[in-house]
Image: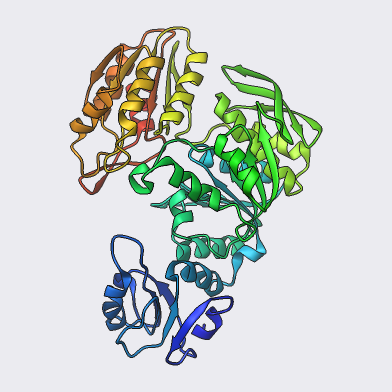
Amino acid sequence: MELAALLAGLEIQEIVGEIRVRIERLCFDSREAGRGALFFCLTGGKRDGHDYAFEAVAKGAVALVCERKLPLAVPQVLVADSRAAMSLMAAHFYGDPAKLLKTVTVTGTNGKTTTTYLLKSIFEADGQKCGLIGTMGARIGERAEAASLTTPDPIEFSRLLADMVKAGVRVVAAEASAHAIYYRKLAGLCADVGIFTNLTQDHLDFFGDLNTYANVKAGYFTPKNVRTALINADDEVGRQIIRGTRCDTLTYALDHTAEIYADRVRHAREGFSALVNLFDRPLEVRCRLHGQFNVYNMLAAAGAAAALGVPDKSIAAGIAALREVEGRFNVFHRGELTVIVDFAHTPDGLRNVLKAARAMTKGRLICVFGCGGNRDRAKRPIMGRIAGELADFCVVTSDNPRFEDPFAIMQEIERGLTGRYILIENRTRAIAYAVESGEPGDTVIVCGKGGEQYQEVAGCRHPYSDREVVRRVLHLT
C-alpha cells in the first residue's frame, strides 16, 4: 500500500519527500523496523520516538510520521499528534475493518472484562459471531490470542479487527482503558455503543489525582468516539458524563432513574435472578455470576445488546449461558469450604467482592490479597482498611511486586489493617495457609490477580496462576 493512501482524513502539517512510496509494515519500535516499514515517532511516553528514527531507517524504514522534521533522506509526514495519526493510519492500512463491524467499547475502573464477556455470550446466543479485545487478550470466535495490555496498541488493534472480519466476526466488544484513551489508541474508531461502568480510585501513579483520571474517562464520550453512550447513572462520574456529553445517551442504574434497571434482584449460591426493565419492556433474567456489581455488568451488557437490535429472548439466553469469566469471582468448593478467586485490585473492587462473598458465607470470611508494585501507592493502606473491616481474617501477600520490595508493599498495606491478620510474602504459601485455616462454612477469597498467568518480579514474568494454586491446594487437580 502506498503512503499516500494512508493519509486520508489525517491533519497534516507538512509533507517532506515523495508520498508514492510503498509501505509494507507499520511500527513504532525501531527494533521491529524492517524493509518497507513506516515508522511512527511517538512522543508523550518515557522516550521520544524521534531519537530512534535513525535506527529505524537504518533497518529499512522507508518513511516516517513525526512531529518535527528530521535530517533523514526518507519521506516524512509531519503531524501535530503522531499517536492519533498512528491510530488512523493503522486502520487504513488494514482496510478500515471497524467499518465492517458493530463495535461496543467498555470503559470504567471495574467491570470491563465481565461486561464484554456477557456481551459475547449474548451476541452468540443471537447467532452472531463475536470478537473480544481486553485484559484477558483477544478472542476471534473461539480462537484466543494473548495480550500484554488491556487495549492493544493501534497497529495491533486494527490487525485484530481485520483478522476478525476475515474470520466472519460481525460484532466486537472491546475494553477501553484510561491509558488507551489518554494515548489516543482508539482515535478514528467511532464505537456504535460506548459503555461507562464506574470510576473509583486506580492508576493515580499515572494520572496524579482522581479528578484527572475522571476527566480522561469522561472525555472519551464525544460524538467523534461514540455514537450511543450507555452510562451508569448510579455513579457520580457517570452522572457528570450524562450532563456533559453531546452523544446520544442511554442510562442504566439500580438506584437512580434510568431506561434500563432491575427489580426483584435475588442472590443465591448459584448466582442471581432479576426482572430487568429494558426500555419499558420487562425481561426475566437468570445469571450464574455473583454479587451486586455483576448486576450492574449484566444491565450494561443487556442495554448495549438491546440498543444494537438483539431480541430480548437472545439477551436472556446469553446472560444465562455464561458460566463464569476466568479470574472474576470464580468459585471452588471442597466440601463445605468455599474458595473464590477474583481480580479485585482496587479499593472499590475489593469492597464489592468482599461484600458479595460475605453474603454467601455462613462462617468466617478469610481474605488473601496484596497490591502491585510501581503503581498507585496511596490505595495500599486503603485496601488494608477495607479488608480488615469486611473480612474476619486477612492474609497479606505479594501481588506483582515488579521493581519494588514485596515486603515493603505489604507493610504499606498493613498500615491500614485492623483486626486479625498475618503477612506471608510467598503467594502460594499464603493461599495454602488461608485454605488450611478454613473450616466448613468458611469462605477464602483470593484477590488481585484473577486470571493472570504470571507473577511479575524484578522485570520478569514468572508462570503463576491463582486458580491453579487453589486447585492444587484443594486437591482438585
Quadrant where the C terminus is found in the figure: top left
Residue drawn 51% across and 20% down? 356
Q: Position of residue 387 (x, y in %)?
A: 37, 20
Is residue 451 visible from the viewing direction of this image? yes
- Residue 138 vs residue 346, the one in the foreground: 346
Q: How many marks?
A: 0
- Residue 337 vs residue 403, the one in the foreground: 403
Q: Position of residue 96 (x, y in %)?
A: 59, 69
- Residue 288 vs residue 376, the one in the foreground: 376
Residue drawn 28% across and 27% down? 413
- Residue 121 vs residue 353, the one in the foreground: 353
Q: Quadrant of residue 238?
A: top right
Q: Is residue 232 above or below residue 83?
A: above
Is residue 477 visible from the viewing direction of this image? no
Q: How is the image coloured?
A: rainbow
Left or right: where does residue 87 sit relative to residue 103?
A: left
Q: Is residue 82 above or below residue 378?
A: below
Left or right: where does residue 184 sit relative to residue 62?
A: right
Residue drawn 21% across and 27% down? 411
Q: Position of residue 26 (x, y in %)?
A: 43, 73
Q: Position of residue 6 (x, y in %)?
A: 53, 79
